[in-house]
Amino acid sequence: MFKQLSLPKLILSGAALAYLLMVILADAADTNQAAASGDLENFSLEQLVNVQVTSVSKEKSDLFTAPAAIYVITQEDIRRSGMTSIPELLRMVPGLDVAQIDANHWAVSSRGYNDQYANKLLVLIDGRSVYTPVSAGVFWNVQDVPLDDIDRIEVIRGPGATLWGANAVNGVINIITKSAQDTQGGLVTVVYGTENQPYTTVQYGGQLATNLFYRAYVTYFNRDNFVDATGQNTADAWNAIRGGFRMDWEPTAENNFTLQGDYYSLNAGETIDETTLTPPFVNRVNFVDDDTGGNVLGRWTHNYSDTSQLSLQMFYDRSEQGDAPIVIKNNTYDFDLQHRFALGSRQEIVWGAGYRYLTEDIANSDFFVSFSPTSDHDQIFSAFLQDDITVIENRLHLTIGSKLEHDNITGFEVEPSVRLAWTPTKKQTVWAAVSRAVRTPSYSELDILENRSFNPPVLATVSGNPSLNSEELTAYELGYRIKPIEPVSFDVATYYNVYDQLIAPVQGAPVFVPPAGPVIVPLTFENVQHADTYGAEVSGEWRVTDNWKLVASYTFSETHLSPTQGYDNNPQNQFQIRSYVNLPHHVELDGAVYYVDQISPPLGNASTTIPAYARVDLGVTWRPVKTLELGIFGQNLLDGNHPEFTSYKTTVLTEIPRSIMGRITWRF
Amino acid sequence: MNKPDSKQQNLRTAKPFARAMALLGLTVCLLVTDSGFAGESPATEYQVKALFLFNFAKYVDWPAAAFTNAAAPITIGVIGTDPFGDYLQNAVVGKTINGRPFIIQHLAADADLSGCQILFVSDSEVSRIGGILDKAGALPILTVGEDEEFAQKNGIINFVLKDGKVRLEINLAAARKAGLTMSSKLLAVADLVKGKTN
């Protein structure tokens, strides 16, 4: 079925293509190996001052004084975690709630409202939004990049709408990959274990001309089914092949060009309960979603001076996403301009303008789920202006700004914010912010017709509502960071969020279809709900010795809905501690414990409590020579089987297994 | 855990192992043909800074009194959190300059500095720079830092990151006060900075 037979061929031809490319480029590739450390040692002073280096120190100081709740996952965190997917990596972020639903579905949210289709979070990969307007969520099982290429993942909890626009309501996740210049040479990673059978990346980076670098990669993975509480497999195995490239060109010190693209094809299993008009009204089906997609992105950055930078970005993204029983076809064309410059000595202005055109087609509609119209499109015009004012140098910064957007669905939206950062000493920052953000209604909420069996013969008919308005948030945030003594730092972020016009289903009068027909309960989406949420995120880092680092965080969150119908699927308490130890002979010994409180999301017909769970991960890596790293990782070691989440779509409660894997990383 | 039923046979890939082998085979093939021109990842900030510290020893002359004898090693002191990892050790291991080998010492902020010829003040000591430089300033020690104001505060050499490159700032007056002579080659690649007089 599907592409099973052609997959090996695809891999082979992809790899062969990459190989051919390498042979052709071999001559070009050997010119700039300046950075090879063997040569560096013999560099003169003139050469050393011109070596391009990678550094994070600037970002670190910016992070400490930033007037927002920011957390960064570094490449080292990624490498030492042993995790093999982007949503899993996000477990490390305080304030995020990451729950795996089955082998290939996750629920990821910031500050509440978690769901498989969590709709208040914006996710960007190298500046490309992967938010799906149909569900207003993210299909995590198609979001991937070679994990070794990730430079960092920046996560902002709280509204980011002033810069990023509608839908950056509760958080923004920026996945940023390394420049091609930073990934020169070959890389082969193979992970093999109880779940990954295998997960393989083959990559090569080289140089085409002076200051023109490239990399190209192919990844493939095949992951096993999970099981339910009875040991029955849950038909959620998946496999994916993905290939891509990135080119970075710096013809002059003022100009940077980036061109990158990816293409993927995957099969992912899921089980759904299809609704039928006749008894027993429910038909359980194992589906295999067949997903393909690709994107290409270009960016030009021009430095007019040290204090003035212009960036122009364009991307095209298409995807064909199975969300059983329907298939969603999506095209996005996006154009973004951003200019940052200093205005006098005390102000830094960032302004930008954007245009996005989206098309959606829904295929495979049936009695269970259909859309009307089946095709839709939208265009979004946006502009923003933000001013960072130095009120007192090195002490007090005020950031004010707003976005103005227009889309075809809800018209004009304004998303202002005011942020204040006070740095009384180099070791302390106090920040506060008030911001407004909106979420535009998804196509599902506008156009869907879903007939869903609840306790047959009750049939819920959920109808979209084309006259919905945007959901609105006013967020109040207060944060504090301190380095009391050198090896220790703390970060506390608190928030109080007030939501209005939240979209929720409203029940109409039931209809009885005699004699043996179903009882039809009509439900329509309306802007009827109000909610207050509040919480705190505390994280700390302690360098116990030069070779031992501890990182810990605690997250508290509370949701009050009014009216109270709807469900609270948030763990009230979350805790984690991670330990990183460097041993002699290039051995690293790492461990992590994650605790997640109980949640009560609905499971199909009834609400099911998912008990609290603790997850323990351990990992050992060893670098016998500079070019080779070996790793063994055990994940979820304590508890062989526990569920983490159910979405309204879940039919079979899937348990997350213990997993053991080995990893080989070879650079050449 | 592995109980594929018949429905799932097609999804559970039939030959994952064969695929892995095919990929591995290809990889080996790539390795054999490409190893000749393969390079490494680019330099990190501290790899380059470590090499600078080694190079400084070539281009700076210490007064004879700075060493206990003609064969005494050049001691590089690192004060504060060591950001170098293995880089500094790798940069100097087995090297000699004018017959002097290198020694690396990690020092506490309040340590006796008189045994050092080169003192690297890590970013972690930002708040203590003044005190450290007061102590080192009168001794024949090449102080090297990485704080924006290091050279202005009468540190001798400061590393500044500019456009992703490590550039040097030198405070010549501070060098003279310490009794050090700097080669014109070193001065040629650096920006000269004046100290703030308090």
Image (cartoon, rainbow, N blue to C red):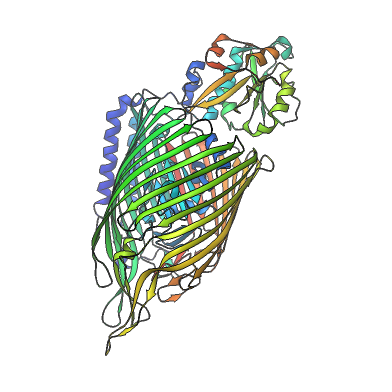
User: In the rendered view of the protein, which quadrant contains the C terminus of chain B?
Assistant: top right
How many marks do you count on the picture? 0
In this rendering, position of residue A665 left or right of residue B60: left
In this rendering, position of residue A526 left or right of residue A628: left
- Can the viewer see residue B90 in this picture? yes
For the view shown, which residue lies furthest in the bottom direction? Answer: A515
Q: Position of residue A489 (x, y in %)?
A: 64, 44
Residue shown at the point (60%, 23%) measured from the top left = B158
Q: Position of residue A316 (x, y in %)?
A: 29, 45
In-front residue for pair A339/A157: A339
Location of residue A299 by image quarter: top left
Q: Position of residue A233 (x, y in %)?
A: 39, 67
Q: Position of residue A665 (x, y in %)?
A: 44, 41
User: In the rendered view of the protein, which quadrant contains the N terminus of chain B?
Assistant: bottom left
Residue shown at the point (54%, 67%) measured from the top left = A598
In-front residue for pair A217/B99: A217
In this rendering, position of residue A206 left or right of residue B105: left
Residue shown at the point (44%, 39%) measured from the top left = A350
Quick check: A458 above or below A37?
A: below
Quick check: A261 above or below A85?
A: above
In-front residue for pair B66/A42: B66
- Can the viewer see residue B93 in this picture? no
